[in-house]
Image: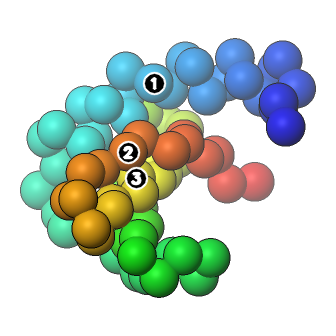
Amino acid sequence: MQKRINERSKRLKLYSAALDLIENTRFAPTSKPNPNDSSEILHRFYGTSKDGIRFYVQIKQDLKTGNRYFMSIIVPK
């Protein structure tokens, strides 16, 4: 399901900040098993953009292959 255009544009503006957060964070992410698939772990990185917008980035890790997948940028309300 696609998000509304204003929600998608807000998340797209945070994309570069999200990549920078993942690459340069000094803190370990919050990690927990995926409740829908026991062979995956979900990692969440929390950050703030230069504009002061708080957001978090969710990454899925496949335990079988070790691959990680960028899932989403979430802006809490």
State how far apart marks 3 and 1 are (Cα).
13 Å
User: At which x and y percent is residue 25?
Assistant: 17, 49
Q: Residue at x 62, y 76 (%)?
A: 36
- Whether residue 23 is situated above or below residue 58 in the rendered picture: above
State how far apart marks 1 and 2 are (Cα).
14 Å
User: At which x and y percent is residue 76?
Assistant: 67, 54
Mark 3 in CB contact with mark 1 (< 8 angstroms): no
Q: Amino acid under label 3?
A: Ile
Nearer the N terminus, badge 2 or badge 3? Answer: 3
Dot 1 crowding, Cα within 10 Å, few <14, some 14–19, many 20+: some
**Quadrant assignment, res 26:** bottom left
Residue placed most toward the observer, 39 or 41:
39
Q: Residue at x 19, y 68 (%)?
A: 28
User: At which x and y percent is residue 27?
Assistant: 18, 63
| Pair 2/3: label in front | 2
Mark 1 in CB contact with mark 2 (< 8 angstroms): no
Secondary structure of the residue carrying numbered label 2: strand
Q: Amino acid under label 2?
A: Tyr
Nearer the N terminus, badge 1 or badge 2? Answer: 1
Tell whether 36 sits left or right of 50: right
Secondary structure of the residue carrying numbered label 3: strand
- What residue is shown with label 2? 69
Q: Residue at x 33, y 60 (%)?
A: 61
User: At which x and y percent is residue 77?
Assistant: 75, 54
Tell whether 50 sits left or right of 21: right
- What residue is shown with label 1? 15
Dot 2 crowding, Cα within 10 Å, few <14, some 14–19, many 20+: few
Residue 30 visible at all: no
Residue placed most toward the observer, 39 or 73:
39
Q: Amino acid under label 1?
A: Tyr
